Image (cartoon, rainbow, N blue to C red):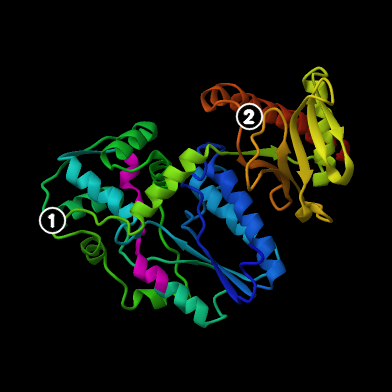
Amino acid sequence: MRDALQGADIAIYLVHSMLQTSRLVQGNFSDLDLLLADNFIRAAEEAGIQRVIYLGGLIPRDEDASHLSRHLASRQEVEKVLGSRSIPVTVLRAGLIFGPGGSSAQLLLNLVHRLPVMVLPAWTRNQSHSIDIRDVVRAMDMCLQSDAYIGSFDIASHEPMTYGNMILRTSKLVRRRMYSITIPTNSIRLSRLWVSIFGATPAYLVNPLVDSLRHNLSAKPNPLLERIRDGAVKFDESVKNSIDSGGRPLPHPMRWHRLSDWRKTYRAKRVRSVQRLPLPGQWSAHILTQTYAKWIRRFTLGLVREVHGRNGQLDLCLVSPRLVLIGFSLTPFSSGCKFRRAYYITDGLLVRKVDPPGRFEIRIIPQLGVIVTAIHGYKPRLPWWLYSISQAIIHVFVMHAFGRFLGKIQRRLIVKSR
């Protein structure tokens, strides 16, 4: 990432980890986004980036952060991480973004075409402030042309309306007769299911959308918003630009490329596993690595032991140093870094050697007081079916147990400090 950013003045951050990047992904998108954002902003600072523009999500007014949906809370966390370094950051907060092939337009149009009768739960009556993709690009262009826009700016181009109104209005635009029934409850879990099925959209895209729409989302007035509204694309035009001559949603321009990528990912049989753990005090990543190695021996009653070698080599062995389960080799990017300890997964009875090798890392996010432990690109030696019902489950169980152990230490340190 650092090498890729060399020579650039401004970086636009559009990453959102909702698409599956490994055959098995253990962890939720908010932890993945946290790790990616921290990786990016550290690399951007080292590469000499002068400014970062980040496309985030609308945040409800006067809303306690503890009550935000996971999706919006994640967007706020990414803002904090990107803003934690020396680089000035411009945050563009947007709601639903409509454009040809975009997931928001496809979901809405699929619902309209597939459901002659629409059941509208309570969340569909909350206000939402959407925007056309071309107006998002206009906003970014304005920020690129001026250094005045530093900070957070809500952007929107459509008039505020409820998601229920969007559905009914879209049905008229595509000339589909639709009847609606309103119910007083939210039914979030049921809504996720029927929106995913009838909207022909994967659950990993639908769930954050439904969770976020239980908030009233409206753009707060600001100078950038006033400039966007002049010549903004209206909702009706956004829908018309997203459909073909038969009123069907236009496909994503990269649809077949994405399908090809997923097939390669599936066949590669790699694993990504990310967990968020509590951070005790001011511990460094090196101390955490040593603590984990000692803790795993106690946790397994001495069956699994750590063996330290030269140049940062670390092996987890089964009883005897000769039976190496997983061997780790310290990467060159860990030297002198208090907040990150990363290893290549090189060999062992549970490891299939591949190029590039898998990685294990412990990363500290001091702004949020958390640790992110992650395995990337690991390929197990066990047959996939056996791995998925044994080693994969055991790994998550062990990391959660280690998290509880760290939580106890954290609580003790808090009591001592008082």
Looking at the rendering, the stretch of residues picked out in magenta corresponds to 122-137
Identity of the amino acid at label 2?
Val
Tell me the number on the disc at residue 246: 1
Residue 8 horizontal/vertical position (percent): 60, 75
Tell me the number on the disc at residue 396: 2
**Where the C terminus falls, by quadrant?**
top right
The reply to whether dot 1 and dot 2 touch (C-beta < 8 Å) is no
Residue 58 horizontal/vertical position (percent): 46, 57
Q: Is residue 285 above or below residue 132?
A: above
Q: Quick one: 346 or 156, which is closer to the camera? A: 346
Q: Residue at x 65, y 55 (%)?
A: 38
Residue 417 horizontal/vertical position (percent): 87, 40
287 on left or right of 250: right
**Where the N terminus falls, by quadrant?**
bottom right
Q: Is residue 175 above or below residue 29?
A: below
Cα separation, mark 1 vs mark 2, equals 48 Å
Residue 134 in the magenta stretch? The answer is yes
Q: Is residue 128 above or below residue 312?
A: below
Answer yes or no: is residue 283 visible.
Answer: no
| Label 2 environment density (alpha carbons within 10 Å; few <14, some 14–19, many ≥20) | some
Answer yes or no: is residue 244 visible.
Answer: yes
Residue 121 in the magenta stretch? The answer is no
Q: Residue at x 61, y 73 (%)?
A: 51
Residue 21 horizontal/vertical position (percent): 51, 45
Q: Quick one: 312 or 192, which is closer to the camera? A: 312
Q: Residue at x 69, y 26 (%)?
A: 398
Q: Quick one: 267 or 288, which is closer to the camera? A: 267
Residue 387 found in image quarter: top right
Tell me the number on the disc at residue 207: none
Q: Secondary structure at mark 2?
A: helix
282 on left or right of 274: right
Q: Secondary structure at mark 1?
A: loop
